[in-house]
């Protein structure tokens, strides 16, 4: 009985000393990676709580407003644009992985089959919309103004041989409209949620050299906290690298 009481006392003491860390994430693969490292963090005295979001705005808003401690869903160009437009001071802690961006269709098997006047949908946020257009340019579907860069918009299209019609929609909705359009440029996290395999199903896809590395993000006043540093170490471990390679088969690529 005394041993049992001592065990409960030790557990209570551990729980009292455990530091909590609440992290926003999109479901796939970010929340899955966080769930994978959760037991490791628990052993190190960090109680990780994962909040799953379906949009790309509230995770940053809630971290900036100190309602959450950190988030894990975005790449650096998106964070830079968010900070600029929202006057926030969020910072990258570490790069974790790349999700090669892809173009998908339920109607055609190659981009050569893209019909005249095809309906094409891309994300409506500045950086991912530009990323989609750059991929279409790389695939030879369109040509952009030389100076357009990662913030390119449909207005920057200067050559459009097939007269495709480009519409901008919220990123999370793109898999749901795939059957209604000729081509959809979809972020890999949403593609995976829709059971699409980028390495097999995408008609065009970024290479592994993509600069759009997904990052762990927090506020500048929280970057060096012990809990955040422990989470960073866990996410950049060899165990996580093996987990990514085994589970996602190239749809997600470690960046460390």
Image (cartoon, rainbow, N blue to C red):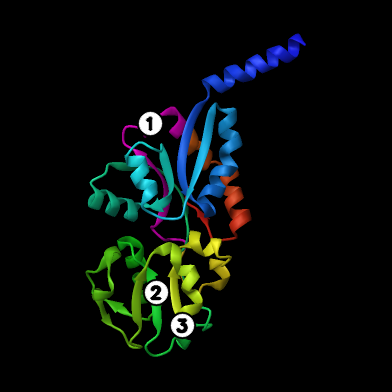
Residues rendered magenta in the picture: 208-229
Which residue in the rendered view is the most extreme toward the bottom?
116
The picture quadrant where one finds residue 93 is top left
Residue at 40% across, 52% down:
74
- Quarter of the figure that contains the N terminus: top right
Q: Residues within 10 Å of mark 1 (few under 14, many from 20)?
A: few
- CB contact under 8 Å: marks 1 and 2: no
SS state under label 3 = helix
Residue at 31% across, 84% down:
160
What numbered label is drawn on residue 121? 2
Instruction: Using the numbered discs, state the Cα–Cα distance from disc 3 to disc 2 in whole angstroms.
Output: 14 Å
**Is residue 19 placed above or below 84 in the rendered structure?**
above
Of label 3 and label 2, which has the lower sequence position? Answer: 3
> Residue 31 placed where, x, y %?
53, 48
212 in the magenta segment: yes
The picture quadrant where one finds residue 39 is top right
- CB contact under 8 Å: marks 3 and 1: no
222 in the magenta segment: yes
Residue labelled with disc 1: 224
């Amino acid at each position: 009985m005394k041993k049992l009481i001592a065990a409960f006392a030790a557990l209570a003491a551990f729980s009292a000393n455990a530091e909590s860390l609440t992290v926003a994430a999109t479901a796939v693969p970010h929340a899955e990676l966080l769930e994978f490292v959760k037991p490791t963090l628990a052993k190190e005295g960090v109680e990780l709580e994962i909040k799953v979001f379906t949009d790309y705005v509230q995770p940053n808003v809630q971290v900036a407003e100190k309602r959450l401690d950190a988030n894990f869903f975005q790449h650096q160009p998106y964070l830079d644009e968010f900070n600029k437009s929202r006057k926030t001071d969020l910072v990258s802690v570490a790069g974790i992985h790349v999700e090669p961006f892809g173009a998908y269709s339920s109607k055609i098997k190659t981009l050569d089959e893209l019909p005249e006047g095809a309906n094409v949908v891309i994300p409506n946020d500045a950086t991912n919309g530009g990323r989609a257009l750059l991929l279409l340019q790389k695939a030879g579907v369109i040509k952009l103004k030389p100076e357009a860069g990662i913030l390119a918009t449909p207005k920057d299209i200067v050559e459009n041989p097939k007269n495709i019609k480009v519409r901008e929609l919220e990123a999370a909705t793109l898999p749901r409209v795939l059957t209604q359009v000729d081509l959809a440029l979809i972020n890999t996290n949403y593609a995976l949620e829709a059971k699409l395999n980028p390495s097999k199903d995408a008609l065009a896809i970024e290479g592994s050299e993509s600069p759009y590395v997904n990052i762990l993000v927090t506020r500048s006043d929280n970057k060096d906290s012990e809990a955040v540093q422990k989470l960073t170490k866990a996410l950049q471990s060899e165990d996580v690298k093996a987990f990514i390679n085994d589970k996602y088969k190239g749809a997600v690529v470690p960046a460390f």
